[in-house]
Image (cartoon, rainbow, N blue to C red):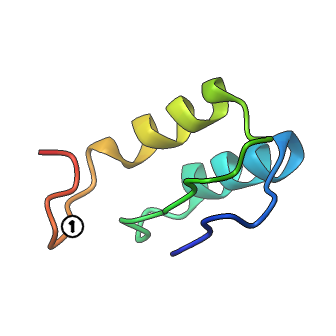
């Protein structure tokens, strides 16, 4: 899911984090270039996706 440069902020980031806790099928979420998104939320999202396998081996 490509959400680059969408103006995502803290509220959107927290919603994405909550969605990833429930949705186990999403493997790739691109949230780069969202300057209002706090680093902690980005790290949380990365941690939630870290153990999911994708065909691109993004985290290897």
Residue found at x 49% / y 62%: 30
Q: Quadrant of residue 14?
A: top right
What residue is shown with label 1? 54
On the rendered structure, is 12 left or right of 47?
A: right
Q: Quadrant of residue 10?
A: top right
Residue found at x 51% / y 30%: 43
On the rendered structure, is 36 left or right of 27?
A: right
Secondary element at tag 1: loop
Which of these two is toward me, 15 or 32? 32
- The picture places residue 16, in percent across and down from the top left corner, at 68, 55
Residue found at x 79% / y 55%: 8
Total numbered badges shown on the rendered structure: 1
* View extreme (top): residue: 40
* View extreme (right): residue: 11
Which of these two is toward me, 37 or 29? 37
Is 4 situated above or below 40? below
Which of these two is toward me, 43 or 17? 43
Residue found at x 73% / y 43%: 35
On the rendered structure, is 28 left or right of 34?
A: left
Q: Residues within 10 Å of mark 1 (few under 14, many from 20)?
A: few
On the rendered structure, is 59 left or right of 13?
A: left
Q: Split into 4 quadrants, where in the image is the C terminus?
A: top left
Q: Quadrant of residue 19?
A: bottom right
- The picture places residue 42, in percent across and down from the top left corner, at 57, 37
């Amino acid at each position: 899911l490509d959400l680059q440069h969408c103006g995502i902020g803290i509220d959107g980031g927290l919603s994405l984090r909550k969605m990833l806790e429930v949705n186990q099928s999403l493997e790739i979420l691109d949230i780069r270039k969202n300057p209002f998104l706090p680093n902690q939320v980005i790290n949380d999202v990365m941690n939630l996706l870290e153990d999911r396998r994708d065909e691109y081996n993004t985290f290897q």
